Amino acid sequence: MEEIISQIPHDLLKFILVAVFSLLIGLEQRRHYKDEETETLFGTDRTFTLIGIAGFIFYVASPQTLLPYLVGGIILGGLLAIYYFQKIKVQQRFGMTSLVTALITYGLAPLVYTQNRALVLLLVVAVLVITEIKENLRRFTTKFDNDEFTSLAKFLILAGVILPLLPDTPISDVITISPYKFWLAIVVVSSISYFSYLLRKFVFPDTGILLTGVLGGLYSSTATTVILARKSKEDIDGNRIIGAMFLALTMMYLRIFLLALFFNSQIAMLLLPKFIALIVISSLVAFYFTKIRKTAVKASTEQIPTSTHQNPLEFKTALLFGALFIVFALVTQFVIKTYGGHGVSVLAFVVGVTDIDPFIINLFQGKLNIEASLIAMAVLNAITSNNVLKLIYALGLSDKSLRKELILSFGVLIVSGVVCALI
């Protein structure tokens, strides 16, 4: 095939590509407007193919000066403008997708000559897809809240504007984290939470119990445990509730490992075998309650509406994370100077009753004068303590009939966490 292609003249091959790409765009236009009268259209397959060929002719006529190509573009633009204003006058319609598509088709020839073929192909695919998903986009936009784009703007500001401007030098001798790494921690945690939020809201808007556990564990396993515990008082199988809680715990271990891998690969490798063991245990518990002890339930009764999922990119959330990050940095440094590395392991149990992400990321990023094994132990202790807090939430908020199963299942995971930290 390569030998055959090599025998084709260079310009002929380019012409074939332009003609084929233009024809594909024209065919898509014909399919898209198949229910409309032909007289009302600017053109479809033949028109768009000829526009692409015209662009090719005018471009190759003088690729150095581009004068014929520019003149042809002006003429085409004038014709499109006349058609557009006539369309508004007669049909009272203001859409101009076909006109913009025609201009893109005219611009294919220079792209085929000057750009990588894969890039041109990607552009053609993008045109075909975008023109086809009009109705899907309309349905998609109905899911947006009033402040959805404001949240996206916040995230872009956090990651793309503020982060690059911050210096990468330690804040002080006491707080050895630089402003850049401090803000990077906020961006990374926000990215994971925001990704989980987008999946729940736009991909799985009314998630079932089990999927809520999986996606919620990426965002906040504690918040997910609270939501599921309250849901257990409705007409839902309690076994699936517990299984979803442990799916959230499984995702929590995965999320923390990814954070460790991102900030401190040495700690991540120390945690890897222990996290594998804890992930296996929590997954087996989830499997037991969802597959072995499951009971039939109606899908509608176990849906969790999108309204229960709060957008994680609230400014106060970032402020709280930052405040906790600074507090834990100061407390950790004080405990190390006063009690040594083992004091941090004890501190981790206390920290577990709060949001553990700032404390854990501080351990991953901080230049602490303690052994890596003690840091790994502190991380495991914080997670174990946080699991105790989840158990308390689950017992207090869930249906009373689940208390025995909750104590036994969480007890297995908590004991396993302690054992992993001591090994």
Image (cartoon, rainbow, N blue to C red):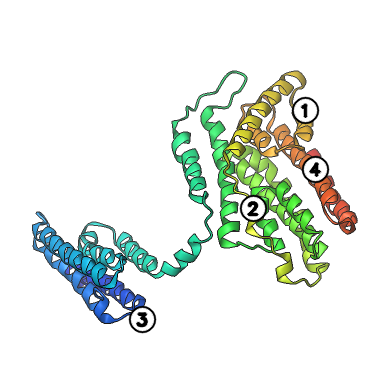
Residue 412 percent location from the top left of the image: 85, 51
Question: Residue 287's image quarter?
Answer: bottom right
Circle 1 packing at 10 Å, graded few (<14), some (14-19), many (20+), is some
| Quadrant housing the C terminus | top right
Q: Could you tell me if residue 264 is visible in this image?
A: no
Nearer the viewer's eye, disc 1 or disc 2?
2
| Quadrant housing the N terminus | bottom left
Q: CA distance from mark 1 to mark 3?
A: 74 Å
Residue under label 1, please give it: 342
> Which structural element holds mark 4?
helix
Mark 1 belongs to which amino acid? His
Residue under label 3, please give it: 35
> Which structural element holds mark 2?
loop
Q: CA distance from mark 3 to mark 4?
A: 60 Å
Residue under label 2, please give it: 309
Residue 75 is left or right of residue 201, and the answer is: left
Mark 4 belongs to which amino acid? Leu
Circle 2 packing at 10 Å, graded few (<14), some (14-19), many (20+), is many
Q: Could you tell me if residue 406 is visible in this image?
A: yes
Residue 373 is left or right of residue 41, and the answer is: right
Q: CA distance from mark 3 to mark 2?
A: 41 Å
